[in-house]
Image: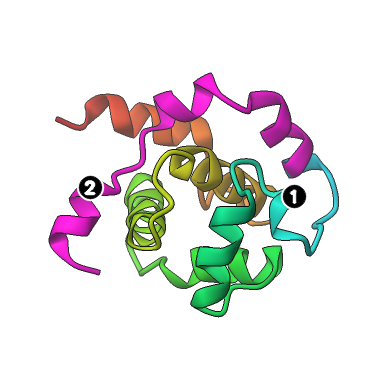
Amino acid sequence: FSVKMAAAGKYDPVKSEKTHVEAIGKFVSDDVDEDLTSVPGIGPAAVANLEKVGITSTVALIGKFLSLHTKGMSALDHCDAFGAWLTELEIHRTRNTVTRAIAEKCNRFMKGLCDHSSILSEYEDRD
């Protein structure tokens, strides 16, 4: 992605706490549902944008999230990268919700990858 898009797509964990908290909790605790609309924040328009780049299932979306991680990357930077990618796909309004849902789902089976409390702490220290 471009630097401009990365800046525009920065993940805001505070915004993600204000919406869809119950839905995110259910998504994280439930088995993976292949339907993209099972991801909190993903509706028909987002599905259409994701399908244009070959993301046709929740598993593929999780795979994309994981593919953006690089060695030594912080959890917040990882979420920023995913948010920037969603922004490139014109998924703006719900990108924080989608990012948090996917990050927490991944953290469930890969402990420490994207722990929300660690992300919040890092976010508070960012200027």
- Residue nearest the observer in this picture, 80 or 49: 49
Left or right? Give the position of 5 relative to 46: left
Q: Residue 110 sits in which quadrant?
A: bottom right
**Please, what secondary structure does the residue beneath circle 1 have?**
helix
- Residue nearest the observer in this picture, 107 or 45: 45
Image color mode: rainbow
- Residue nearest the observer in this picture, 30 or 89: 89
Residue type at mark 1 is Ser
Q: Which residues are magenta?
A: 1-27
- Please tell me which residue is depicted at 23% across the width and 27% down the height of the picture: 125
Residue assigned mark 1: 38
Q: Main secondary structure of the magenta part?
A: helix
Residue type at mark 2 is Ala
Tell me, yes or no, whether the two marked residues, 1 and 2, touch with CB atoms within 8 Å: no
Q: Position of residue 31 (x, y in %)?
A: 85, 53
Q: Position of residue 10 (x, y in %)?
A: 29, 44
Q: How many marks?
A: 2
- Please tell me which residue is depicted at 28% across the width and 24% down the height of the picture: 124
- Please tell me which residue is depicted at 63% across the width and 54% down the height of the picture: 44
Relative vertical location of residue 63 with respect to residue 111 in this rendering, above or below: below
Left or right? Give the position of 76 relative to 2: right
Left or right? Give the position of 112 relative to 75: right
**The magenta stretch spans residue 3:** yes
Identify the mark nearer the N-term, 1 or 2: 2
Residue assigned mark 2: 8
